[in-house]
Amino acid sequence: MREPHHIGADRQLFLDDEIIETMTGTRRKLHEPVRREKVILPEHPWEAHLAIHAQQFADGDGYRMVYGCAAGDPDGGNPRVTAMAESDDGITWTKLMLDVIDLDGSTKNNLVWKGPGKNVAVFLDENPDATRDAKYKAIARGDRGSDGEDTLLAMSSPDGIHWRLMSDAPIFEDGPFDTHNIAFWDTWRKAYVLYARSAHGVGSFKGGVRWIRRSTSSNFEDWTPWEQIDCGDTPWEDLYTNACIQYNRAPGTYIMFPSRFVPYRTPNPDWPFEGVSDVVLMSSRDGLKFDRSFMEAFIRPGPDPDNWHERSVYITRGILQTSPTEMSLYGREHSSLPDVHFLRYTLRTDGFVSVNAGQGGGEFVTKPLVFDGAELEINYSTSAVGSLRVEVQDASGRPIPGLAMDDCPEHFGDEIDGVVRWSSGASLAALAGSPVRLRFALKDADIYAFKFNP
């Protein structure tokens, strides 16, 4: 018998089918975020151009967003700068005048960096050994090196506002890096990881497609050779940016939201550049092999015609929990237009993918799992006539007395942290540490995640 999956008390999502053995009358369903309000608008002269390079993260009792901007078209000579906004709830954002960066003779702005380097990607360093003067770190795209390619620079800050280069020498000189190159302290690998712009098979997109590569470091200064991420045998597509995160509600789960660039389609013949973009979702269990079982878009350009041109729709890095039932993602829309803006999107907590069954019903059975705990928590939703039931089986697929399907009353409703009960009153505690299978029966219902609790 194959080795069971040891899941402990970690939440299990359905981003891939790794823990699913069989499915009958059910399917994994990708859910698209809902567009909400505009959160960052170009209100100041230095924000006339809002770049895709933004990230948002929890910091203390509130949230911070760090984003790239410029006084006008950066390709026309306007220098890119880096600005910051803060929020108490992830919905309403305030741009504080920080008096840190002199821009055109004034420090009355919300800027935190004006170079050297641009496309700045900031994170709050969770490395327990990080020094107090480097609790915030960042990666910036530097000038072209001796071989004519972009470079990458390492930065640090004690407070996220006052920044310095960690060294004048770049950490990488083998670009291109003309996008948002994401770094963070990987709390599971106990190392810094860096996901950067690359291409399939070559150092640039010439002769290949735009792609993503990874390097790791123990000290944010010395980095391992690049490795291309692996998406198996799925078709090659141009993937710009990556917005990679650790999804901490499901330990061991990495998620990316690359912008997919389609260079051979140009909906608006009057637009000066070719191509159109949308956003896809990819997940990984090791940070290098990424599942692309969902090739369809995670976020479409939508009905707004101003999103139907190249590089218009991007997701920025970071997911914020804006209510117990709601996660907020953020993205840039209306690229290169006067009303370019950052928008908030919402998604049900853990609601990237569900296992779904229609009115006719269906079921699925997991592979053998070894868990810790005494009760089963589920994130699920049903219609008024829908239902969900669960059976616990031994590793060979035999129902466990008291935990069979007939012992489980219909669960119906909509809960992020519902608990499964069996009419027998049986506890799961005696099964902890032993391999079991879970059989879920659904009718007009979705299940998004499950975990075991003490």
Image (spheres, rainbow, N blue to C red):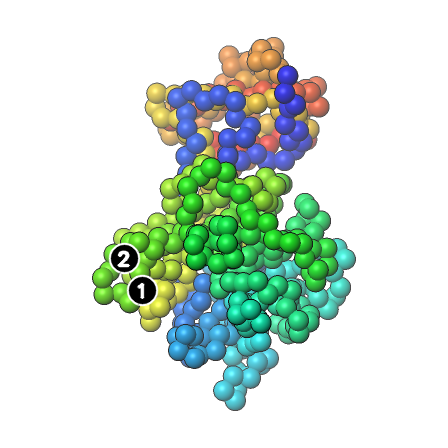
Q: Position of residue 351 (x, y in %)?
A: 47, 40
278 shown above or below 272: above
Report the quarter where the N terminus lies. top right
Q: Position of residue 98 (x, y in %)?
A: 57, 77
421 shown above or below 418: above
* Label 2 vs 1, first from the N-terminus: 2
Q: Which mark is residue 273?
A: 1
**Secondary structure type for disc 2:** loop
**Residue type at mark 1?**
Phe
Q: How many angstroms separate mark 2 from mark 1 (CA)?
A: 8 Å
Query: From the viewer's perspective, is 75 left or right of 284?
Result: left
Report the quarter where the C terminus lies. top right
Q: Position of residue 10 (x, y in %)?
A: 63, 35
Label 2: which residue?
A: 266
203 shown above or below 404: below
Q: Are marks 2 and 1 in contact (CB under 8 Å)?
A: yes
Residue 2 can be seen, yes or no: yes
Q: Residue at x 55, y 46 (%)?
A: 229
Query: From the viewer's perspective, is 163 left or right of 449?
Result: right
